[in-house]
Image (spheres, rainbow, N blue to C red):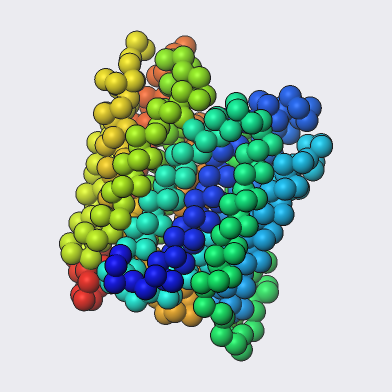
Amino acid sequence: MRTLPRTARTAVLALCAAQFMLILDVVIINVAVPSIRADLGVPDSRVHLVGITYTLTFGSLLIVCGRLGDLAGRRRMLLAGLGLFVLASVLAGVAQADWHLFAARALQGVGAAMVSANALATITASLAEGAQRNWALGLWAGVGSAGAIAGQLVGGAVTEILGWRWIFLINVPIGLVVIAVFASVLVKDAGRVREPVDVGGALLLTAALAASILALTSISEAGAGAPIFAAAAVVLFVVFALVERRQPAPVLRFALLRLPGVRTANVTLFLNAGALGATLFFLTLYLQVVLGYSALAVGAAFAPVTLVILVLSPLAARLTGRFGVARLLGTGLVLLTAGAMLLARMPEGGTYWLDVLPGMLLLALGSAAAYAPTFVAASHGVDAGEQGAAAGLINSAQELGAAVVLAVLALVATASAGAQLVGGYRVGVLGAAGLFAVAAAVAWTAPRRLGISGGSPG
């Protein structure tokens, strides 16, 4: 955007580059797991910890880290978090035993949470509502979605050419460059906000989110601990809600959820992220198990989706300022519903060009249209001093939505598969289409002027 000062543009690009790297690290590991298991001798009973240790700390700390940025300074949190992420990436890349890798991945997640929530909050707090913020959030949405999809392609290529250790070590030069840019272009934090840190609420919320993620992981892996973790999560959330109502400076003000934009964004993104993640999961299995694609070929098959999202997301952000959140977000979710329904055909003797690519392109168009207005809505009407908490909240909705929906639909698909695995895949994708449709219905209920430049939420 030409009207945005050069320093501000550079800051937005650096913040988005950091987010791309963090999201990439969620997915990039998938293709490398067989190599890691062989090199480090990881037993099958623990191999899933390579991914979980990152998502557990990442997902459970987002809201708390966002609120700490509101109080202690976002620039400080960004520099410290990215430094921690780079250090943890080095430790992961040189790991000599499985527990070394698990610990390093957990440390990566802590750094990622510090960066992700405060990067988004820095954008929304520093740019006024309207065209400039919409442009930045369109770029943010595009790189986030593209990172999630591109992870398989990048992971496959790096693992095959350089070896699995480089999926972590490539973070080091990129991270150091981004740290240097952060240090030079981000405005120094003002004095520390004189407000007490809600330590009890932070610990309760982190524990509740962690228990939720562990419960979902146990469900997806048919683990016996799922009921225990689920019960613990429910109890912790209840206690957290009771404690926060009496807290004069809570880690998360429930009044945020009464804002129409925040409420619409969190509900729709929870469903959208989950349904899209599940669709791509079943589609990956279809390409590999049924059509016989290699991991690298699957990554290449997703390349058009990544390109479409990157190109069109900034355009969707501009259109949001003209037509509003409800129209863009609702339209995007309708396209996602159509794409999932088309992909749910999944014939036994299908081909990529006729049975996969058309549906994938609809998913790409829908994602490009939906994600930018989602993040516009998530920050609409939020005070600058609470943008960190709001950013942590919307990022948590995305992470938890992906985990919840995949766990549930994977169970449904397994129960429905019978003798034909592809039958289970079809049921899973149809379930995702239904969730896209529900999200679309929620989106259309948003105030019509929400997100329109110069308009009130109505």
Q: Residue at x 60, y 63 (%)?
A: 179
Tell me where residue 270 appears, x and y as whole percent.
Answer: 42, 52
Q: Residue at x 46, y 67 (%)?
A: 11
Q: How many marks?
A: 0
Tell me where residue 185 appears, x and y as whole percent.
Answer: 51, 72
Q: Which sits in the foreground, 123 or 399?
A: 123
Q: Which sits in the foreground, 371 or 213?
A: 371
Q: Is residue 79 above or below residue 329?
A: below
Tell me where residue 137 appears, x and y as whole percent.
Answer: 37, 61
Q: Is residue 91 left or right of residue 415?
A: right
The quarter in which the C terminus is drawn is bottom left
Residue 308 visible in the shown view: yes
Q: Which sits in the foreground, 129 or 264?
A: 129
Q: Residue at x 66, y 66 (%)?
A: 80
Q: Residue at x 69, y 36 (%)?
A: 165
Q: Is residue 172 left or right of residue 41?
A: left
Residue 262 visible in the shown view: no
The quarter in which the N terminus is drawn is bottom left
Where residue 178 sits, quadrant-wise, is bottom right
Farthest residue to the right: give it. Answer: 96
Tell me where residue 181 appears, x and y as whole percent.
Answer: 54, 65
Q: Is residue 41 above or below residue 436?
A: above
Q: Is residue 318 above or below residue 129?
A: above
